Amino acid sequence: MKRLVVASFLTLLVGCAVQSRPQGGPKDEIPPAITKMVPSVGELNFTGSKAEIVFDEYIQGSKLRGNIMTSPPLEGLDFEIAGKKLKLEWDEGQLLENTTYRISMGDEVGDLNENNKYTNLEVVWSTGSFIDSMQLGGTIDKSGEGAFEDLTIWLIPSGADTVGTPKFSATPNKEGKFELRYLPVDTFDLLVFEDINFNKGWDEGESYGFLKEVPSTSDSSFISIPYSTEVFALPELDTTALDSVANYIDTTSKENLGQISFIIPPSSDSIILFAHRAGDVLINLSTRATSDTVITPLAYYAPGKYQVFGYIDENANGSWDSPSWTLNTSGEPLISGQTFEVKANWELEQPITLPNTDRDEMEP
C-alpha cells in the first residue's frame, strides 16, 4: 500500500510539473509603449541635464551605445537602462538659449523578451519658447564599397573654411536615406564621411563627400549628397610579363590575335583612359578635349578579358583630383565598370561609355 501511495504521489508531481509549463500561444510582436517621458515631446523652456523615458514593460538596448545622435551635440551624454526606464544624462551648463534639442535613438530600444523595436525613439525639447520646425532629408549618392549605416552626416554652418564641430548630425539608414528634423531656419554645408578611427570626427584620409549651401525647409525637400570610396590608381604590372606579351604580339601568327578599334565619345575635358588585362597588358587610350568622336585605328591585341578604367581630367593637370572641401569641388569623375573580351582572329569595335560630366560646382 505504501509503495502504491508513493508511486501515485510521484506520478502526480510529474503530471503537475508538465502541466505548469505554458504551451503554445501567439508570439509577442508588440513593441513597448511609452507611459511617461521627461521632458515631454516638444516641451518648452527646458534647461535640465537629465531625461527619462518610462515604458510599460522591461526593455533592452544592446546596440544603443554608439547609436545615439544628438542635435545640437551634447557633451558627456550617457544612458542607463533600469527595468522599464531609460535614463539619459549630459553635462550641465551647456544648453544654448532659444534652441531646439533632439536626442535620437533610432530603432535601438526594444522589449526585453522578444526585442520588439520602438521605432524612431527620440526626445525633443526647446530651451526657449518655440520648437524649430524646419527639416532636411534626402539620400547618399554612394559609389564604391561600404555600408550606408557606417556613414555620418554633419550639418556645418554654411561658409566655414574648415570642418569643425557640427551643429547637427544624423546617420543614414541601410538604403542611404536620412532625415533631420527640428532645424532652425538656416543654410548649411553638409558633410558625409566614414569615421574609420571611431574618434567621432572627420580626419584627413577618411572618405568623404559634401554638398554646400543647403537651406532648411518647411517641407520634405529631397537632396542628394555625392559620396565615393573609389580612387584612381594605375594597376600593378609585371614588367617581365609585359615584355613577354609584347614579344608574343610581335612574333605570333595574326590568327592568334584579335583586332580592336575603340570608339570614344566627344568630351569637353581631357580623358585619361586605359584598358588592361590583369597584370600584363596596359592600353593607353587617353585623349584631349574634343567635340568629335574619336575612333582609334584597328590594332592587334592578345586574347583575354580586359577592363576599362580612367577619369575625366576636368582641370587638365594630368592627375586625378579627389574632392576638396576648401575649393568646393567634387572628385573628378571616374571611368570604371566596363569590360570587354578579345578573341583570337576576331575584329571588334569597342564603344567606351563616359560618366555624365555636365555639372558645375557642387550645388544643391
Image (tube, rainbow, N blue to C red):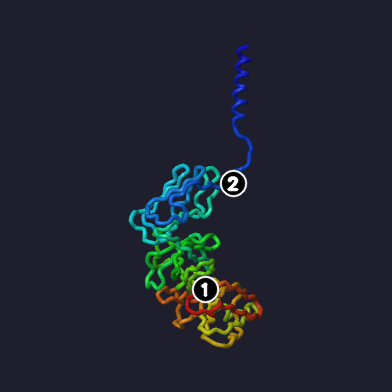
Give how far across and how far down residue 99 sits, in percent.
40, 61
Residue located beneath label 2 in the image: 29
Q: What is the three-letter code of the residue carrying label 2?
A: Glu
Q: Earlier in the sequence, mark 1 or mark 2?
A: 2
Q: Residue at x 64, y 77 (%)?
A: 256
Q: Residue at x 52, y 69 (%)?
A: 223
Would residue 238 be visible to someone looking at this image?
Answer: no
Position of 244 compared to 202: left or right?
right
**Mark 1 neighbour class, 10 Å CA radius: few under 14, some 14 to 19, many 20 or more:** few
Residue located beneath label 1 in the image: 241
| 132 up-or-down from 328: above or below | above
Instruction: Report helix, strand or loop for mark 2.
Output: loop
Quadrant placement of the N terminus: top right
Q: Nearest the camera: 218 or 237?
A: 218
Q: CA distance from mark 1 to mark 2?
A: 62 Å
Would residue 53 be visible to someone looking at this image?
Answer: yes
| 46 up-or-down from 333: above or below | above
Q: Nearest the camera: 277 or 4?
A: 4
In the displayed orientation, state which residue is furthest to the left.
93
Instruction: Report helix, strand or loop for mark 1.
Output: helix
**Mark 2 neighbour class, 10 Å CA radius: few under 14, some 14 to 19, many 20 or more:** few
Q: Residue at x 62, y 29 (%)?
A: 19
Give how far across and how far down residue 39 sits, in percent.
43, 52
| 58 up-or-down from 164: above or below | above
**Label placed on residue 287:** none
Give how far across and how far down residue 262 sits, in percent.
60, 82
Location of residue 73 (image quadrant): bottom left
Location of residue 351 (image quadrant): bottom right
Q: Nearest the camera: 180 or 229?
A: 180
Give how far across and how far down residue 322 sits, in percent.
45, 74
Q: Which of the two marks, 1 or 2, is nearer to us in this view?
A: 2
Q: What is the three-letter code of the residue carrying label 1?
A: Ala
